[in-house]
Image: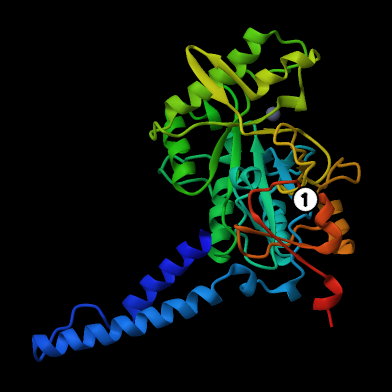
Amino acid sequence: MNKKILGLFLFTLILSGCGLGPKEDLESSVKTEEVVVEAEEKVEEEEKEEEVVLDPKDQIDLSLLPNEAGKVMVLMYHNIGPEEKEWVRTPDNFKKDLLTLYEKGYRPIALKDYVSGNIDTQAGYTPIVITFDDGNKNNFEYLEDGSINKDSAISILLDFNKEYPDFLPRVTFFLNGDIPFGQGGLEGKKLDFILENGMDVGNHTRSHANFKDLAKEDLEKEIGGQANHLEGLISNKDYRVNTIALPFGSRPKDDSLSTYLREGSYDSKDYFNIAILNVGWNPGFSPYDGRFNFESIPRIRASEMKVDNVGMYNYLEYFDNNPGERFISDGFSEVITVPEEKLENIKTNPEKEIYVYKIEEVVN
Ligand SMILES: [Zn+2]
């Protein structure tokens, strides 16, 4: 099916590339017809050839050692501010983080693409998910002249993307309370800006609630109420806020209530979360791994202070030393490429084609 679509796409490219567009000086209609018939035959031949070539597996570069059973880091940030603290990164340190990730071959993907397994990261590179919690003003601040504060997280991300166009600002902001980013009157404008620039808005509850002892009604109010509130601020009325970062990483003590983290209803409107994010402390499974659980996605603190050896830089070092543990993209979202010894981790029926290879056969 995918192959056919790719084939058709190429066919279109061939058509437009074969000079079959409008001709300005046609000598006679008869001649034109001959030309068209000849060209059509040629196109049919080329189309057949291209279809054969276009199996993505033939285009996957195994020498890059793709491993789509590898781990994916979901980074957790909070504040950007002038003084480095446990939950504050300075603008310079945030830029350093982005540059380090870039140079080590990590490329941001949307959280929603991570959980749905729609990973089209460039071949040989590793997807990474970046998140910000709490919607602090230092994440996104408009100045009086209407410009965005250059030291805001959002500004740093967009500037970095200008310098490194293949490092997209695919960040999710998890927002709690009435006025995300703390500037009343500008909430809607900010959320629209985020979505228009390829970033995302997630749920962090009405009151930054601790879910431990909450009753069903309160869980639904905290989650559904905030989804409704944020959706109300966003101009695109089709947009759904359907990812959540648990405040304090807390879950109901009564396990039977956990279902309300995922789905429920508030004020006659249903919600369904496709990703539920924890606070700590390790890299996430590949979305194709049988152990991947969208209802419990671990995150890694993107900090260097009090990280107990499980912070972002610890894991960057870990993956440098254990490259076989790292997710390496094959460049095609429709194929899952894994070295033979990792195949056992891939879930049954991943609804995509699996391509297995032997590392010793591609390393020389
Ligand atoms: Zn929080």
Disc 1 CB within 8 Å of nearest ligand 1 atom = no
Is residue 1 visible in this depiction of the protein? yes
What SS does tag 1 mark?
loop
Q: Is residue 183 above or below residue 152?
A: above
Which residue is the site of mark 1? Answer: 346
Asked which colour scheme the image uses, the reply is: rainbow
Q: Is residue 134 above or below residue 91?
A: above
Q: Quadrant of the C terminus?
A: bottom right
Q: Residue at x 83, y 40 (%)?
A: 281
Is residue 135 visible in this depiction of the protein? no
Quarter of the rendered structure image containing ligand 1: top right
Quarter of the figure with residue 43: bottom left
Q: Residue at x 49, y 30 (%)?
A: 183
Q: Position of residue 280 (x, y in %)?
A: 81, 37
Q: Identify the amino acid type marked 1.
A: Ile
Q: Residue at x 67, y 65 (%)?
A: 330
Q: Position of residue 88 (x, y in %)?
A: 72, 40
**131 left or right of 44 in image:** right
**327 left or right of 23 in image:** right
Question: How many numbered marks does the figure carry?
Answer: 1
Quarter of the figure with residue 208: top right
In this orientation, which residue lies closer to the viewer: 179 or 34?
34
**216 left or right of 51 in image:** right
In this orientation, which residue lies closer to the viewer: 100 or 339?
339
Label 1 environment density (alpha carbons within 10 Å; few <14, some 14–19, many ≥20): many
Q: Position of residue 302 (x, y in %)?
A: 76, 46
Q: Position of residue 264 (x, y in %)?
A: 59, 17
Q: Which residue occupies the extreme left position in the image?
A: 28
In this orientation, which residue lies closer to the viewer: 42 or 358?
42
In this orientation, which residue lies closer to the viewer: 240 or 354?
354
Q: Is residue 129 above or below residue 209?
A: below
Q: Residue at x 47, y 49 (%)?
A: 197
